Structure formats: structure tokens, C-alpha cells
Amino acid sequence: MNTQINIRMPQKLLSSVKSYSNEHGFGSVQDFIKETIREKLFDEPEISKEELALVKKLVDVSEKKKLYGTEKELFAKLRRR
């Protein structure tokens, strides 16, 4: 069973959260907040600089070869895996 909670935040912060959520393929602000909490509590240590550089190269190649449509579509595909 899920429990509902309420969060108060400044309007400017909420606006930024909405934009980020939309741009990065989250279905809603709630989904973004839940995922952020999961990352903080359960995920492995942060990605290394070398790993991040590799991911950036992969994104660059993917963009040049048009292997996906939009960033939103890419993140949606990655979330399904």
C-alpha cells in the first residue's frame, strides 16, 4: 500500500522541477521525486569521471548517427531496461 505525502516548495523550485522532469522523460513531478529519493537511498556510488566521459561520447555518436529521436525518447527507452 502506498502512502501519500505532501511537499511544500517555493514556486520557482517547483517550476524548475517541472521543466527538468519534462525534459528528462519523467511522467510527472512525483515520478521524478520518487526516482531521486531511490537514487539517494539505494543506488551505487556516483558515476566516475571516466564513466561519465564514456557516456558523453556514446551520446555524441548516437546523436550524429541519429540512433534515437529526442532526449526524452532516449531516456524513456533507458528507463524500460
Image (tube, rainbow, N blue to C red):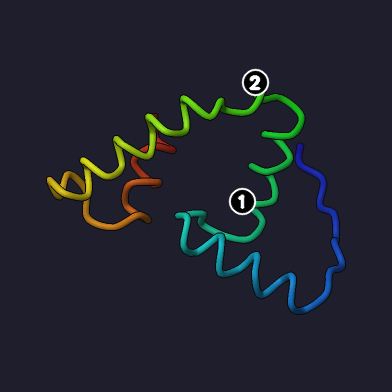
Crowding near the residue tagged with mark 2, few <14, some 14–19, many ≥20 C-alpha atoms within 10 Å:
few
- Type of the residue with mark 2: Glu
Q: Is residue 50 left or right of residue 45?
A: left
Q: Secondary structure at mark 1?
A: helix
Question: Where is the C terminus found, in terms of image quarters?
Answer: top left
Q: Is residue 54 left or right of residue 16?
A: left
Residue 1 in the image: state x and y as whole percent. 76, 37
Front-lying residue, 30 or 9: 9
Residue that carries the numbered disc 2 in the rendered image: 44
Front-lying residue, 36 or 61: 61
Q: Secondary structure at mark 2?
A: loop
Residue 5 in the image: state x and y as whole percent. 85, 54
| Rendered residue at 68%/43% (across/down) | 36
Compared to residue 76, the image places residue 23 above or below, namely below
| Rendered residue at 37%/29% (across/down) | 54
Q: Is residue 2 left or right of residue 59?
A: right
Residue 26 in the image: state x and y as whole percent. 51, 54
Compared to residue 41, the image places residue 37 above or below, namely below
- Type of the residue with mark 1: Asp
Residue that carries the numbered disc 1 in the rendered image: 31
| Rendered residue at 69%/51% (across/down) | 33
